Image: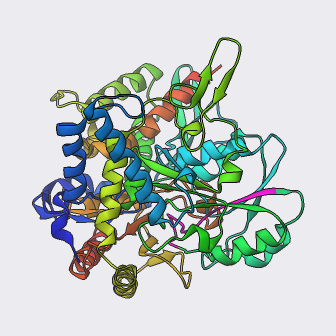
């Protein structure tokens, strides 16, 4: 397999893509976001429970490629228990990671496995769909 | 059978020889088409229909000769029945002027969005011919839909997603029995078999140049003259008028009534060059060659575990839509891309059809007469690689 394909389809991504974590609807969520990519049909619904500006629970449902599903799964894993401000910061870092060549100092933890996506510009939207859905959910927080 | 005529096909991507299997989206252009477009800009570039100088006369002659080429290619009765447009989508939008709000139109469940949305914009009530499990149209349901309230049947000749070739001659005859007019969307079929509008007796037809080895941004509408006369102008502007005053404007004759503004002259000339290029082959050779590609690919692809073909009509063009266990179409397309193989993944602008087959998207191989069985072998190998990655 080619090097960049191996980078893209790392074991973690394949595994999260086929067995996504937090793949459920939440009861009585604080807010819900909807994400849809009309070009490819990928869609995500994301529920959040928020207590005192801390995201205490996350659950998503939807369908899409391995990249979009794994990205949603990894996002939920890494942001649960974080503050909204931390989540916003993570979004900025993640976006920079995928859309620019800037070398980042921040430790992204598991999210770093998605860095291979930047070699595949056509797939960046797949990886960022969950994150845009998060933005939508936070905007819907009354 | 002729790959060497198409310069874009002779290249490597990611260090692998390009296998171009996205012909349903657009076809590659033979050198003669590229040359015809260049030659026009190098030697004859001028506007049409209005100049008295030498270049304008040349441009005008070539542009109108292109209209004749199309007329001959689809065997229209008159050159007045051929209108240049940007492509099939614009053609259907133009023809939707035939429909008033509340009119009933029959379409099928396998239509491209371009043969759904213009009718909705026109305010038509849509009656939809269902698609059977094998990807063929339910002709019994079609017969039941034909009644005196229907103003138009607008159907695809060949599905861009499934490859299904619909029995349009029979469907046109059934509609005409009830005095209902028929529009054929030939965007997909135009490059894969002969189309004779007089034999089919279709009332309207649209196709796109870029899907028959011609340039993008050019296509044609065919309509029976007496029917085109009844449709109001599609756009206002230069060339489509007869007399203009601030009080009243009268319109030009067919086909110019529908061609406002400076047209895509080079595109029309390029399209004519593409039709000339195709005319050197016999349709029976092209059909047999592409049928062999389809049969070969459909058999070989069965060796990939967990792969399911969507659309198994008896009469189909060289298109294979498929899904795989575990691997989403986008992941399939990305992995194939890095093996040099260009395929399409997504809903193919047929979202209702995706819903019908209960899939979010499909991967699609669509072939043309320059593809080879060796290329199919490379594609099958890459599909096995997909399987390995996602196992």
Residue at the spot 70% in from the left edge and 42% down from the top edge: B231
> Can the viewer see residue B130?
yes
Identify the residue at horizontal 53%, vertical 32% (top origin): A56
- Residue A26 vs residue B195, the one in the foreground: B195
Q: Residue at x 55, y 75 (%)?
A: B165
Q: Nearer the viewer, residue B72 or B381?
A: B72
Residue A17 visible (yes or no): no
Q: Which image quadrant for residue B344?
A: bottom left
Magenta-highlighted residues: B151-163
Question: Outermost residue, left direction?
Answer: B15
Quarter of the image that includes the C terminus of chain B: bottom left
| Residue A125, horizontal then vertical, whole percent | 38, 40
Residue A71 x/y as whole percent? 39, 45
Q: Is residue A25 above or below residue B339?
A: above
Q: Specify whether residue B153 is painted magenta.
A: yes
| Residue A78 percent coordinates (x, y) | 39, 38
Tell me the quadrant of the picture where the N terminus of chain B can be found. bottom left
**B83 horizontally vs B344: left or right:** right
- Horizontal arrangement in the rendering, residue B2 relative to residue A142 (left or right): left
Residue at 45% x, 50% y is B219
The verdict on residue B172 being magenta is no
Q: Nearer the viewer, residue B282 or A131?
A: B282
Q: Is residue B147 above or below residue B284?
A: above
């Amino acid at each position: 397999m080619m090097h960049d394909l191996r980078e893209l389809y790392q074991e973690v991504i394949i595994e999260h893509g086929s067995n996504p974590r937090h793949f459920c609807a939440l009861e009585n969520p604080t807010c819900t976001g909807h994400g849809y990519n009309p070009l490819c049909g990928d869609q995500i619904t994301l529920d959040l429970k928020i207590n005192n500006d801390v995201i205490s629970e996350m659950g998503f449902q939807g369908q899409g490629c391995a990249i979009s599903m794994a990205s949603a799964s990894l996002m939920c894993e890494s942001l649960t228990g974080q503050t909204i401000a931390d989540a916003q910061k993570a979004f900025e870092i993640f976006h920079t990671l995928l859309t620019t060549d800037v070398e980042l100092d921040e430790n992204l933890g598991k999210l770093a496995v998605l860095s291979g996506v930047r070699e595949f510009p056509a797939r960046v939207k797949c990886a960022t769909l969950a994150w845009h859905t998060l933005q939508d959910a936070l905007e819907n927080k009354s | 059978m002729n790959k060497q005529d198409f310069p874009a096909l002779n290249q490597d991507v990611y260090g692998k020889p390009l296998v171009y299997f996205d012909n349903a989206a657009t076809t590659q252009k033979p050198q003669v088409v590229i040359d015809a477009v260049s030659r026009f800009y190098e030697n004859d570039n001028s506007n049409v229909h209005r100049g008295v100088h030498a270049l304008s006369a040349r441009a005008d002659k070539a542009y109108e000769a292109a209209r004749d080429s199309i007329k001959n290619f689809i065997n229209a009765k008159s050159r007045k029945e051929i209108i240049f447009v940007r492509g099939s989508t614009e053609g259907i939008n133009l023809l939707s002027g035939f429909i008033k709000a509340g009119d009933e139109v029959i379409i099928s469940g396998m239509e491209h969005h371009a043969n759904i949305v213009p009718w909705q914009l026109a305010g038509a009530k849509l009656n939809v011919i269902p698609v059977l499990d094998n990807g063929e149209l339910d002709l019994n349901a079609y017969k039941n839909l034909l009644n005196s309230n229907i103003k138009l049947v607008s159907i695809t000749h060949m599905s861009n997603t499934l490859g299904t070739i619909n029995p349009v001659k029979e469907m046109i005859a059934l509609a005409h029995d009830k005095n209902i007019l028929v529009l054929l969307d030939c965007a997909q079929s135009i490059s894969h078999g002969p189309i004779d509008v007089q034999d089919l007796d279709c009332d309207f037809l649209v196709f796109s140049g870029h899907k028959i080895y011609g340039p993008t941004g050019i296509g044609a509408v065919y309509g029976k003259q007496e029917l085109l006369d009844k449709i109001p102008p599609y756009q206002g502007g230069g060339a489509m008028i007869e007399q203009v005053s601030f009080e009243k404007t009268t319109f030009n004759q067919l086909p110019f009534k529908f061609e406002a503004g400076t047209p895509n002259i080079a595109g029309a000339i390029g399209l004519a060059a593409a039709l000339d290029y195709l005319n050197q082959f016999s349709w029976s050779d092209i059909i047999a060659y592409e049928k062999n590609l389809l049969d070969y690919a459909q058999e070989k692809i069965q060796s990939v575990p967990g792969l399911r073909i969507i659309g198994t009509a008896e009469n189909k063009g060289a298109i294979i839509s498929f899904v795989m266990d575990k691997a989403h179409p986008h992941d399939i397309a990305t992995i194939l891309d890095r093996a040099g193989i260009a395929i399409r993944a997504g809903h193919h602008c047929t979202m209702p059809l995706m819903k019908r087959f209960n899939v979010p998207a499909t991967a699609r191989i669509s072939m043309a007469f320059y593809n080879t069985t060796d290329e199919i072998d490379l594609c099958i190998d890459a599909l096995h690689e997909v399987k390995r990655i996602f196992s």
